[in-house]
Image: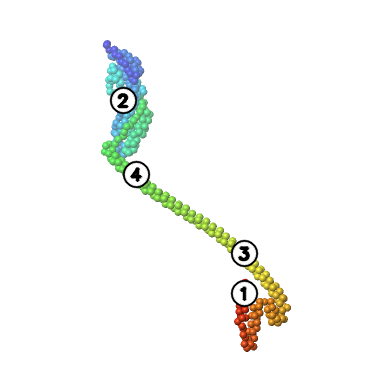
């Protein structure tokens, strides 16, 4: 009606009202009426925006790569952005009269690609595939300190590189190589496991042999201990036997001395008796033997007297012509002989 319009902006929109070539009002979330023929409304979104990206690069070893990710940015100086790009709207806050609002995202993507290229070309294919997080961290720090972004009035809040992929042919080659590497590692693991099993069996056998050696060593020590104990016992027994022999030698020596003493005493006693008998018989030395014999007959047995008589007859047999011995005499001698036996 008569060119008067009403606009209502969200709190995330920074609105600048120009009228007659001059700034009338500016702020976030404004609502006001304006005269359209003489007014220009600029709406700059100040909320954070997510921008996906994907572009191709080369690694250090000249291998093609695809870098895919997303970054988040925010306009912190909307008036500076509005001075560089056309954010003029037509009645509605999101109906822009130009395509400049889309150019800001493209400028940021171009700047990001330059920084990512600088990092990717420093790494080989194998390294850069595994360094997406490291590359994102480095690039994010560079973008936060970039003077180009500050001159645009924009700051990057976050950067995420979702993947850095080689071309399908290279990816299949790497996949095959990785598969072969995994198979080789699997074979190596089997080999190592078998070696570990063999090593374990060897250790078990060595432990068994060590145990047997220890047992045999203990047995040898036991035998040596027994032998040493037997030697000690034998030595003690020898000492006992030696002591016994020494005692017997001493005893025999004492016995020898005793026998010598006894022999000496017996000899002395025999000499004494011989001397006594010699002294007692010295009186009979001059007597006729027949007289001594007659003296002995007087005190002896009658049979002895008969035997002496027969002895005398036998000594004088050459002088006797005939000798008659009556049976009665012999019977008498026999009877007298038996009588003592009967008694």
Secondary structure category for the residue under label 3 = helix
Q: Which of 150 and 270 lies nearest the eye of the viewer?
A: 270
Q: Do the numbered discs 1 and 3 sit on residues whose CB atoms are within 8 Å?
A: no
At x 32%, y 25%, the residue is: 49
Instruction: Say which quarter of the image contains residue 277.
Output: bottom right
Residue that mark 3 sits on: 251
Nearest the eye: 18 or 29:
29
Disc 2 designates what residue? 104
Q: Quadrant of the C terminus?
A: bottom right
Identify residue for label 1. 339
Question: Residue 68: x and y, percent?
Answer: 30, 32
How far apart are the two marked residues, 4 and 1, measured between alpha carbons? 131 Å
| Rendered location of residue 31, percent (x, y) | 33, 15
- Image quarter where the N terminus lies is top left
Q: Secondary structure at mark 4?
A: helix
Asked if marks 4 and 1 touch (Cβ < 8 Å), the reply is: no
First reached walking from the N terminus: tag 2 or tag 1: 2
- Residue 181 image point, x, y percent: 31, 42
Mark 2 vs mark 3, CA separation in Å:
136 Å
**Residue 265 makes an appearance in the image:** yes
Residue lying at 37% horizontally and 48% vertically, measured from the top left:
198
Marks 4 and 3 sit apart, C-alpha to C-alpha, by 89 Å
Mark 3 Cα shell of 10 Å, populated few (<14), some (14-19), many (≥20): few
């Amino acid at each position: 009606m008569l060119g008067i319009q009403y606009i209502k902006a969200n709190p995330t929109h920074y609105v600048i009202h120009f009228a007659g070539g001059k700034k009338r009002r500016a702020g976030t979330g404004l609502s006001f009426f304006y005269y359209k023929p003489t007014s220009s409304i600029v709406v700059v979104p100040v909320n954070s925006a997510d921008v996906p990206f994907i572009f191709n690069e080369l690694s250090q070893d000249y291998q093609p790569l695809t870098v895919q990710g997303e970054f988040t940015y925010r306009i912190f100086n909307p008036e500076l952005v509005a001075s560089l790009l056309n954010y003029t709207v037509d009645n509605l806050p999101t109906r822009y009269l130009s395509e400049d609002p889309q150019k800001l995202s493209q400028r940021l993507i171009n700047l990001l690609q330059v920084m990512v290229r600088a990092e990717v070309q420093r790494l080989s294919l194998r390294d850069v595939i595994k360094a997406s997080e490291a590359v994102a961290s480095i690039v994010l720090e560079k973008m936060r300190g970039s003077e180009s972004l500050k001159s645009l009035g924009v700051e990057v809040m976050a950067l995420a590189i979702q993947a850095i992929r080689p071309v399908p042919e290279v990816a299949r080659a790497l996949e095959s190589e990785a598969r072969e590497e995994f198979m080789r590692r699997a074979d190596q693991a089997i080999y190592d496991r078998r070696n570990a099993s063999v090593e374990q069996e060897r250790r078990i056998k060595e432990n068994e042999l060590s145990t047997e050696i220890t047992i045999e060593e203990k047995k040898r020590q036991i035998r040596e201990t027994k032998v040493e104990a037997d030697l000690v016992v034998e030595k003690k027994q020898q000492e006992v036997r030696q002591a016994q022999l020494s005692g017997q030698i001493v005893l025999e020596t004492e016995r020898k001395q005793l026998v010598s003493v006894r022999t000496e005493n017996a000899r002395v006693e025999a000499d004494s008796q011989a001397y006594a008998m010699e002294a007692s018989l010295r009186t009979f030395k001059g007597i006729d033997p027949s007289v001594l014999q007659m003296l002995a007959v007087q005190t002896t047995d009658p049979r002895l007297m008969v035997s002496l008589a027969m002895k005398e007859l036998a000594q004088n047999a050459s002088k006797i012509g005939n000798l008659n011995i009556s049976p009665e005499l012999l019977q008498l001698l026999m009877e007298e002989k038996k009588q003592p036996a009967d008694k």
